Amino acid sequence: AGVKHIVKTFHGMFTPRNKLQKTVQGLRRRLAGLAGTRFVAISRSVQENEMRTFGCNAKLVWNFADETGFPIADVSVGERMRKTLGIPDDAFVLLSVGNCHSDSHYKIKNHSLVINALAKLPDMIRRSVVYIHVGAEKEGFPERNLANELGVVANTRFLGSRNDIYDLLCAANVYVMSSLHEGLPISTIEAAFAGREMILTNVQGLKDFGGVIMDGITYCELTPESIAKAIQEKMESMRLAAVPNLSGNLSIREDALKTFSMKVGVAELVKLYSGRV
């Protein structure tokens, strides 16, 4: 109907449940490709998964976000947010952003890993740690229940859905993602724009950040012990740093802007839709 270029973007790691589903999904991709559809993957992990699983040759166009709403972290904004939340100035704050309202989201985001890690910290260290989870929670509040069972309720804040993510990033020392896998999460890109150091699980869709951002990321295995160790290492490195704990890391932001800015992403998509690549 007059449409010259069709682009389909894969945002996640599609895993077929069985051989039939794999065959059907692969056939759909091949037929669409023969009809002129161009395929895009938002991360190298997604790109490799499409080729490996379905034989689909997707072009890499990195996921991107609007950096204008996430400047380098402002210390004064962070201090105000901590005061609002009743968090001490000297607390070491971890932040995760992600909805866990459905069974699949709850499983993939895997925030229980961080809660279990809190319980693995030595008592003297855990006293100064606060973990903030922003996002819709699963019915029955299993994360809160786990925190209660492990005796780390005092170390957690469950804030639900909010629209002041930048302010919360300013209040945090470290951004944490404990997912089982991802596509390339916008929330982590936003954290990088704010210059926040990160603790990430070494999984598809998160490991991609390590090839772009050269500083400030600690990768962990999918165990509470690995996360707990990373928390302690971040606390120690920031204690020894010459800059205030809430200052953003400018090199993280600069690296992120080169690949994940809206200007870069939109320019790549314009090339695709105009048929120039």
Image (tube, grey):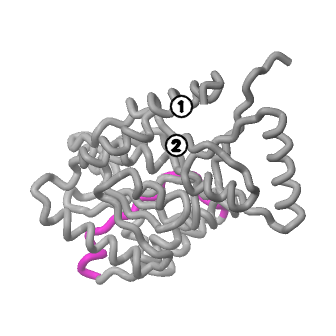
Q: Does residue 143 lie above or below 85 as drawn?
A: below
Where residue 196 sits in the image (x, y, percent)? Answer: 32, 51
Disc 1 designates what residue? Answer: 268
Q: Residue at x 29, y 56 (%)?
A: 215
Magenta span contains residue 129: yes
**Cβ atoms at labels 1 and 2 below 8 Å apart:** yes
Identify which amino acid the numbered label 1 is placed on.
Answer: Glu
Mark 2: few/some/many CA within 10 Å (<14, 14-19, 20+): some
Q: Quadrant of residue 21?
A: bottom right
Question: Where is the C terminus found, in terms of image quarters?
Answer: top right
Magenta span contains residue 64: no
Q: Outermost residue toward the top? A: 2
Which region of the structure is painted magenta?
123-139
Q: Does residue 119 lie above or below 97 as drawn?
A: below
Q: Residue at x 52, y 71 (%)?
A: 112
Mark 1: few/some/many CA within 10 Å (<14, 14-19, 20+): some
Where residue 267 sits in the image (x, y, percent)? Answer: 51, 27
The image's mark for residue 106 is: none
Question: Which element is circle 1 on?
Answer: helix
In the picture, measured across the screen, residue 57 lies left or right of residue 71, that is right
Separation of marks 1 and 2 at Cα, in angstroms: 9 Å
Question: Which element is circle 2 on?
Answer: loop
Identify which amino acid the numbered label 2 is placed on.
Answer: Trp
In the picture, measured across the screen, residue 220 lies left or right of residue 60, that is left
Q: Residue at x 86, y 59 (%)?
A: 23
Disc 2 designates what residue? Answer: 62
**Which circle's residue, 1 or 2, is located before the other in the chain?**
2
Q: Residue at x 83, y 38 (%)?
A: 34
Q: Does residue 261 lie above or below 87 as drawn?
A: above
Where residue 61 sits in the image (x, y, percent)? Answer: 55, 40
